[in-house]
Amino acid sequence: LNQWAAVTSALKRTRQERAGALRQSLVGSPSGPAGSHLGKGQRRQLLYVISLRDRPAPGGPGVMGEAAVAAGPCPLREDSFTRFSSQSNVYGLAGGAGGRGELLAATLKGKVLGFRYQDLRQKIRPVAKELQFNYIPVDAEIVSIDTFNKSPPKQGLVVGITFIKDSGDKGSPFLNIYCDYEPGSEYNLDSIAQSCLNLELQFTPFQLCHAEVQVGDQLETVFLLSGNDPAIHLYKENEGLHQFEEQPVENLFPELTNLTSSVLWLDVHNLPGTSRRLSALGCQSGYVRVAHVDQQSREVLQTWTILQDGPISRVIVFSLSAPEETEDRPQREEYSVLVASMLEPAVVYRDLLSRGLEDQLLLPGSGQFDSVLCGLVTDIDLDGRPEVLVATYGQELLCYKYCSPERGLPGAQRGFHLLWQRSFSSPLLAMAHVDLTGDGLRELAVVSLKGVHILQHSLIQASGLVLSRLRRQVEQRRRQPQRLGDRVGAGPAETPAS
């Protein structure tokens, strides 16, 4: 009995240590427990959001879901790794605005690093540089960061950073918005970092993201910030005053109101070629809401909701179909949503507009490696169709492909299949697919507890793919004149003589 008690006590201590490590990885605190700088009420809220379930280590007994075998090896290789001076969190990565340019990563001790590639000694080399953003105190802990390019005809890069300043017994949350209006400096990060609007917040901030919305006869990009109030807060630019102001979210996003739980992740997806959008949000209570909205009338056309076990770490709206629209066959409007939970395997709900949240497909093996902390939907294998990537606290990156008989795969079982997986040396927190080198081929940036990994395609394989597709294009163009000549040569059908 004494030996059993000792073993049980050791297991309990191990689980408590792992729970503490995850708390630190998500919101982090280099000087104490996560949220120790906050008031009691705020601290309880924050610790609940990031709590890790009490269960065995990754790969041990009690893991969720069934095992899955990868179809092949990861096609990406690690080109560089940059170590952080202090850890980041799940909201600490901002992909290059517009899918290209500089990558921004925020660490808990108030540091923001910019990642890019530049020409050094006739070679393209990765460069990591600390950016000196104004009005971030040395004792501040950064919570989230985001960046976007202004919607045309406006010009300029905008950066938003939320942080909590240590003010003794109670932490003080702030949102800093950086934007330079000086002609010629609108996209210069060093200049932008000095032009700051400082807004004090009355709530603990979580995810900071942006969305493009129709305002009158023009498009406008706005910041959306979730908090523990619980609510979504909207910040829109006032052109006359050259600054951003908070405005009622219901004016532009009526689907983001009446929340009973803090939103941990929000994704707004404008439907191409329409005035409609799909907005998805996931809450700490496990509540998931997806809304179909007409932007012009501000009318919520449809709403679907579900309740899952545990906090929702990621929701992403995406389309599985390739851009194959033709005059004879317009592209079918089919959208899906990825839902990742901290306590359950990740799932995809297919064909939202027709079936809502009824057609659920499991990502096999996604529950094998502890909590799924982040996800990404992008074309990794360069075939024109998106793959689903999920990254876990159990140090695994998993890539899934949707397969079905109608996609030219006879006998294929409908659903998502594990293409490949890649192991890392520490838990994974965030991802972005960005063209850092400017060669048209995007790199995959993966943020772990220790730093940023930059993964690249093999240039030999990529160049071979380009050549094969060019040959195919040439063959298709050769056939087109022949077909046209056949039609002209045939002429109109002759009628028999009477």
Image (tube, grey):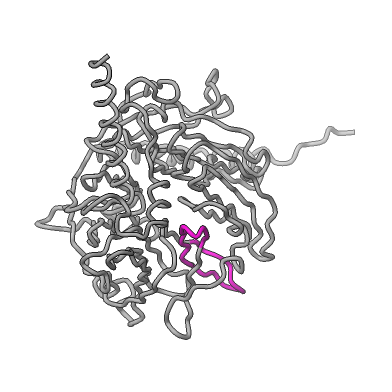
Question: Which residue lies most toward the top here?
Answer: 1
Q: Residue drawn 37% across and 71% down?
A: 177
220 in the magenta segment? yes
Q: Camera-side residue: 214 or 117?
A: 214
Does 296 sit left or right of 21 as displayed? right
> From what the image shows, is residue 271 above or below residue 238?
above
Question: Which residue lies most toward the bottom here?
Answer: 240
Q: How many marks?
A: 0
Q: Residue drawn 48% across and 67% down?
A: 222
Question: Which residue lies most toward the right here?
Answer: 498
Q: Residue drawn 28% across and 54% down?
A: 436
Percent x, y of residue 219: 54, 69
Q: Camera-side residue: 276 or 356?
A: 356
Does 317 sit left or right of 105 as displayed? right
Place residue 420 in its image quadrant: top left
Q: Quadrant of the N terminus?
A: top left
Which is the main secondary structure of the residues drawn in magenta? Answer: strand
Does 425 sit left or right of 297 as displayed? left
Instruction: Using the rendered image of the protein, determine whether residue 268 is visible from the camera's viewpoint.
Output: yes
Percent x, y of residue 131: 22, 66
257 in the magenta segment? no
Percent x, y of residue 113: 23, 59
Q: Residue drawn 31% across and 79% down?
A: 184
> From what the image shows, is residue 171 above or below residue 244?
above
Q: Magenta residues?
A: 211-232
Percent x, y of residue 387: 44, 37
Place residue 453 in its image quadrant: top left
Q: Quadrant of the C terminus?
A: top right
Q: Camera-side residue: 276 or 365?
A: 365
> From what the image shows, is residue 368 above or below residue 261?
above
